[in-house]
Amino acid sequence: MEKFETFTGTVCPLDRSNVDTDAIIPKQFLKSIKRSGFGPNLFDEWRYLDHGEPGMDNSKRPLNPDFVLNDPRYQGAQVLLARENFGCGSSREHAPWALDDYGFRVVIAPSYADIFFNNCFKNGILPVVLDEKIVDELFAQATREQALSLTVDLQQQQLVVGDAEPIPFEVDPFRKHCLLNGLDDIGLTLQHVDLIKAYEARRADEAPWLFS
Amino acid sequence: MSAKTLYDKLWESHLVRTDEDGTALIYIDRHLVHEVTSPQAFEGLRLAGRKPWRTNANLATPDHNVPTTERSGGVSTIADPVSRLQVETLDQNCRDFAITEFEMLDPRQGIVHVIGPEQGATLPGMTVVCGDSHTSTHGAMGALAFGIGTSEVEHVLATQCLIQKKSKSMQVRVDGQVAPGVTAKDIVLAIIAKIGTAGGTGYAIEFAGDAIEALSIEGRLTLCNMAIEAGARAGFVAVDQKTIDYVKGRPYAPKGEDWNKAVAYWQTLHTDPGAEFDNVVTLDGAAIKPQVTWGTSPEMVVGVDQAVPDPAAETDKVKADGMRRALEYMGLEAGTPIRDITVDKVFIGSCTNSRIEDLRSAAEVAKGQQVASNIKLALIVAGSGLVKAQAEKEGLDRIFVEAGFEWREPGCSMCLAMNADRLEPGERCASTSNRNFEGRQGQGGRTHLVSPAMAAAAAIHGHFVEI
């Protein structure tokens, strides 16, 4: 995983609550056995006017001009601004893969579904939780004629918009450490091989049927 | 010793280590694997030169992509080449890594959340994970079960552990008894209506109370299945005699001396008197009506005797906007009685409602009746090959076929429409599945979530009816 470094990017506002992972990446694209290439189908059903299937040339498909991702102001956006319960539904990791492949590195929302939230960190995406009032204010700024540009500083745990007072956010220290250092969870866990084996030995004694 | 919740017991018995900040490494007893969320995990293992930590902790089956129509020709005859590749990839990965798989033509194949309990592969007191959000289902056995992403699938394969933080605990208590005709599906939809689709976010939910104790294990599987639709990764029910009776004699269940030892342990798997939850929600079972969703989120649900709600009456602007968008997508007018909603297709199946009791309850409604003329397709998709065989033994297949339903092979089918079973744009479906999201059952498709009895009644009458 790549290290998460401070960057400044455009904010794309997606003004809907309960955006589910079926909407983020529809089921027909889950048939891929790869991790990459999902970006062109991110929000496929909202983004295009036709029905998308794997293998189509997405550059030739009719775009939905009313969908925010197609707004010229938000081209190249790296920050997705969303509403409550973002990423609910299916556990598909294809959702953060699609966000990442499109170029999003940060999502900001008042709340997330647990599995999606967790999946983001595994893929180098930072899901920022902010109070609903602050999210409302960011929506107001992001929907003006001039797109909103924002700096994400994970080390300092703050978002910076121009000269305004930085907006602090909370993040789990372990997850922050992994993101900043681009650490692989499996490698970290395998440092504890002895503890896992000791657990198994103890448990197999208490509950042998679990190991048969 | 302080009083503990069931969640405390399940959590603590699986702790391998805990950091000062509460980040824990927990041991996973059972890992269920299907074709959609596993290929990239196996690929990750290969790239890193790793092997599964404990092969016999894994059980795999293809379910999401398999056709439900005639398929005796095997995987090579799956028409959609992308689906075929995914099923073939699972078969190959399980062979390469020596993981037990019930392949498509195995009589035990089925939806992963149906076959786990059916085989006794999901046992009380276990931690159970799968790259599928509906893994919460297995909590019905008194297990800690939750869905994970593909990175975590790889992590479990490689280490038999997961890095987790303990959730907060919530008790959802349904007191009293529900009326006849009110099922586990109605109970869980009523719970979601009350707490909302994000109400359980950050929590592990223990379902309790008289109405929950009265449910069969199959009912509890339906209930826990939809914990995730209330935002909770895990939902569970304490072990009681029903749980133990259900497990006894199943292929993967403990035998002999192990059985006695296991039962003694399982009998401790309940919340101690006086244990405290971070949050408690109560419902009156007697007040729960058969439920029908009207919108594009499972919390958009009302009793069948009610009408489609009016966004104008909603004071929260974001919510009202969501309701308007949902009504537009669903092609419904506020104020329409639920009974007046006609449907085009009916789907009885999915990890929520495809077990034998579900099929029996639908067959009871369908017996001697005919599917209404406005119904284009009424599908019955058993949850597993064994459920299908049992239903055929009981003659349920004939009841369905004579009434005009199609009797299909097991799989996830039209719950998420990854195979050929799907809604066309604008089609309306009475479905026993778990998600009514936009496009879930096919782009532009309109889903109403209901119980198997309600779905069967909608097929017979062509619209929702009070049952």
Image (cartoon, rainbow, N blue to C red):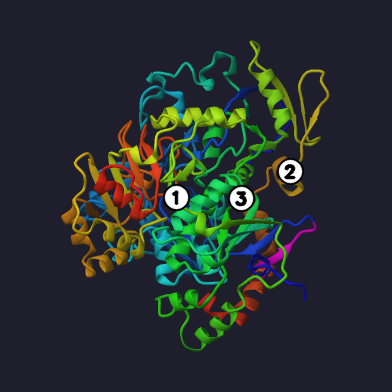
Q: Nearer the viewer, residue A127 or B208?
A: B208
Percent position (x, y) of residue B183?
42, 59
Chain letter of mark 1 equals B
Q: Which residue is mark 1?
A: B39
Q: Which residue is mark 2?
A: A176
Q: Nearer the viewer, residue A49 or B198?
A: B198
Callout 2 secondary element: helix
Give yes or no for residue B14 being in the magenta stretch: yes
Disc 3 from disc 2: Cα separation: 25 Å
Over which residues does the magenta segment extend?
B13-20
Q: Residue furthest left?
A: B402
User: Do pointers 3 and 2 mark residues of a single chain?
Assistant: no
Quadrant containing the N terminus of chain A in the rendered view: top right
Q: Which residue is mark 3?
A: B200
Who's the residue at 64% across and 43% down the image? A121
Percent position (x, y) of residue A67?
50, 21
User: Do pointers 3 and 1 mark residues of a single chain?
Assistant: yes
